[in-house]
């Protein structure tokens, strides 16, 4: 079946590709901000007004998770491209893992007073959106006949 006849299934690789791009931008922007400004020192140096003992582990956790999600997203994209039978399982695990880590990040960041006192609704929107997208995607991957019919290959066949 040609790719343009995938229907709703075509949304998954588009979401994965845009997710990879967003992760790359987030990683590059985050590293650039931490390394070029005195942000890192002000957040992690005792005695600094912005210091909180949770900043250092939270920042490291966020970068490790972002790199992990980047790796997993690229892997899931390759499974989609190859029509591999493991795609639905890996996509479900990636989506659940992403929602789980967004939840951990949300509540961990809320333990830092500078973030907790901020009345911005963006973190709440991200958390709710992550959970809603995960519920929709997981239910689609588990119930769709198109998914069951498309991802049947056991491995990648070598080119002739």
Image (cartoon, rainbow, N blue to C red):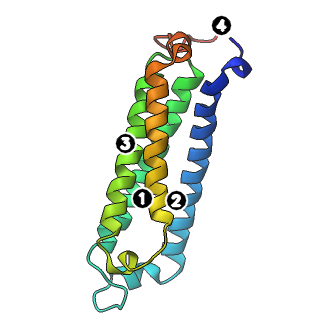
Q: Which residue is mark 4?
A: 160
Residue 58 image point, x, y percent = 33, 66
**Helix, strand or loop status at disc 4:** loop
Q: Residue at x 32, y 62 (%)?
A: 107
The mark closer to the camera, 3 or 2, is 3
Q: Which residue is mark 1?
A: 63
The mark closer to the camera, 3 or 1, is 3
Residue 136 image point, x, y percent = 48, 35
Q: CA distance from mark 3 to mark 2?
A: 18 Å
Quick one: label 3 or label 2, which is nearer the N terminus?
Answer: 2
| Horizontal relation, residue 122 to residue 108: left or right | right
**Helix, strand or loop status at disc 3:** helix
Residue 64 image point, x, y percent = 38, 54
Q: Tell whether label 2 touches label 1 (CB within 8 Å).
A: yes
Q: Which residue is mark 2?
A: 27
| Horizontal relation, residue 19 to residue 65: left or right | right
């Amino acid at each position: 079946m040609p790719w343009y006849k995938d229907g709703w299934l075509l949304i998954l690789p588009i979401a994965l590709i845009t997710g990879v791009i967003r992760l790359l931008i987030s990683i590059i922007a985050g590293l650039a901000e931490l390394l070029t400004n005195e942000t890192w020192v002000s957040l992690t140096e005792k005695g600094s007004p912005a210091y909180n003992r949770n900043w250092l582990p939270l920042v490291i956790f966020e970068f490790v998770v972002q790199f992990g999600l980047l790796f997993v997203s690229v892997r899931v994209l390759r499974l989609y491209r190859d029509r591999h039978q493991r795609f639905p399982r890996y996509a479900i695990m990636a989506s659940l893992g992403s929602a789980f880590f967004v939840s951990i990040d949300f509540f961990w960041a809320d333990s830092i007073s500078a973030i907790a006192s901020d009345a911005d609704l963006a973190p709440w929107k991200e958390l709710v959106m992550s959970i809603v997208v995960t519920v929709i995607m997981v239910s689609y991957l588990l119930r769709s006949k198109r998914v069951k019919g498309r991802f049947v290959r056991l491995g990648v066949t070598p080119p002739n």
